[in-house]
Amino acid sequence: MLWNFLLELGVTMELMKQGAMMTVLSTLVAALAWPTTLLSATDLIDSKWSVAPDRCDKAGKLLAEVLRKGLHGNRPVTLVEFSLGGRMIFKCLEVLAETEQNAEFVERVVLLGAPIAIQDENWKAARKMVAGRFVNAYSTNDWTLGFSFRASMFSKGLAGIQPANFPGIENVDVTELIEGHSSYLWAAQGILDRLELDTYYPTFRILPSRNLEKTP
């Protein structure tokens, strides 16, 4: 009787150990599943966003050519863009900077959440191509921008999420107005109103909150 009891107890303990091991393994597998999903999503983002900057650079070269040919007329232009559009503008300025004779084409520039590396980019040359104000509007909580460009630019600093401290660059922190990267789509007008671009000195005044509300 005692032997049977001990045998059953041993079997029970072994089953409990196996059950505990299965529980631990299932927990471990579940813990690893989420990072694996993130890595898969990361690969997808990398593949999409790695192509977009290259296309924006090509579009920037085309924009520079349009300005050189005077297809916009005889007046200097104001360039305002957000996200990858800001990168296109920056590339346009870099191309124009290849010849000093192109300094009369652009009067003002406003970059909103632009994925432009702070290092390894010729900010000084780009600034010379802008006669008036050169604004870098950034949001420190724009995680979409930081995550999407983490591999290629984030380690070098990114203008869309932090100041670009170069002479002549007007850095404006719009974190309080931006909930996410797409918020620039509806907050852009309010940001431009605060900047008062018609002035020739740095300005970012406080406006009633109704000017920043999302329009239906």
Image (cartoon, rainbow, N blue to C red):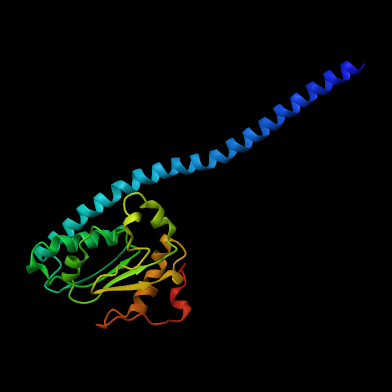
Above or below 115: residue 187: below
Residue 35, horizontal then vertical, whole percent: 50, 42
Residue drawn at (41%, 67%) of the image = 186
Image coordinates for residue 125, horizontal then vertical, percent: 16, 66
Q: Residue at x 20, y 62 (%)?
A: 122
Q: Nearer the viewer, residue 53 or 81?
A: 53
Seen as rendered, the residue at the extreme right is 1
Q: Nearer the viewer, residue 146 or 23?
A: 23
Q: Position of residue 199 (x, y in %)?
A: 27, 83
Which quadrant: the N terminus?
top right
Q: Residue 17 or 96: which is nearer the viewer?
A: 17
**Residue drawn at the location 80% of the way across and 24% of the way down:** 12
Residue in front for this viewpoint, 60 or 4: 4
Q: Does residue 169 sit above or below 96 in this rendering?
A: below
Q: Position of residue 170 (x, y in %)?
A: 29, 74
In which quarter of the view is residue 56 placed? bottom left
Image position of 2 with respect to 62: above or below: above
Q: Is residue 45 above or below residue 89?
A: above
At 45% from the left and 61% from the top, the residue drawn is 180
